[in-house]
Image (cartoon, grey):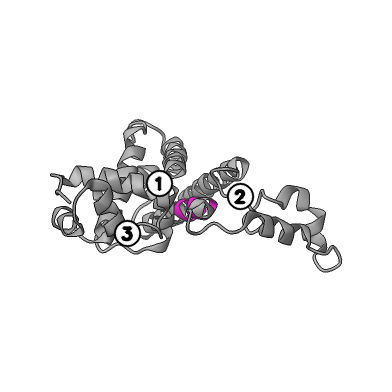
Amino acid sequence: MPEQAINADEVVGAALDLLDDVGLHGFTMRALAQRLGTYPATIYWHVGSRGEVLSAASARVLDSVFADLPDPTSTPWDAWLDAFARGYRRQMQSHPAIAAWGVTHFEARVPAPDDLEIIVGVFARAGFHGEALALAYNMFLGSLIGWVGVELIADDPELGSDPEQMEGSVRALDADDYPTIVANLDHLANHAIAFRWQGGIANPLDAAFDFAVATWIAGLRAQLASRSG
């Protein structure tokens, strides 16, 4: 086929489109090259390996999160973290395969260091320093990435389970064997992790996410209060 002229920016954009269509496990360099009208070797030349392409796509999504956030130097730290958490989730809802990538892969280099500097700076301005800063950063960012990844991973076309089979499994739980689960099944069925048959795109866990963010931030406030008391 005649090869089309491409650049790194076009590769990353096409990679995001392909990920949205086929999911993380369906993403191949051959499929990406076909979408771009070129050869895999050309993509390797412009961006690098499959992992490097996915990392670049992830960094672009993260940059989109930060583009819509308030000024971190003039916004209260807790309000900024709340906005960041919600912005991160919104972007991942648009690109669930990137959410899956975030919880299943380890980067070869520091991802999006400019964005990470902003996050670390917010924790420092809040009053966390040294080991306490690292602990707070790990708790919040790890909880956020993991929570959103778990909420959305079933929306990857390659990873979603059989909804009818899963619903039947939930509904079939016996009250004699699982009395607490069955007593609360109206609130758990398709509304709680491990009891869902729809992913977070079709059935977003909005109330649970609100509760999680509020709990993370309340915990950070409590840590600051205990350290200053």
Which residue is depicted at the point 43% across and 59% down? 103
- Say which mark, if any, is on residue 198: 2
The one nearer the camera, 20 or 148, is 20
Question: From the viewer's perspective, is residue 179 above or below residue 211?
Answer: below
Q: Which residue is mark 1?
A: 20
What segment is highlighted magenta in the picture?
Answer: 143-151
Q: Which residue is mark 3?
A: 28
Secondary structure at numbered mark 3: loop
Secondary structure at numbered mark 2: loop
Left or right, 12 with respect to 141, comes to left
Q: Residues within 10 Å of mark 3 (few under 14, many from 20)?
A: some
The residue mark sitting in front, 3 or 2, is 3
The one nearer the camera, 198 or 147, is 198
Labels 3 & 2 near each other (Cβ < 8 A): no
Closer to the N terminus: mark 3 or mark 1? Answer: 1
Q: Position of residue 175 (x, y in %)?
A: 85, 62
**View extreme (bottom): residue:** 177
Which residue is depicted at the point 43% across and 45% down? 92
Q: Position of residue 65 (x, y in %)?
A: 36, 39
Closer to the N terminus: mark 3 or mark 2? Answer: 3
Task: Tell whether position 118 is magenta.
Answer: no
Residue type at the position of mark 1: Asp
Closer to the N terminus: mark 2 or mark 1? Answer: 1
The one nearer the camera, 31 or 176, is 31
Residue 208 visible: yes
Left or right, 8 with respect to 131, comes to left
Residue 119 visible: no
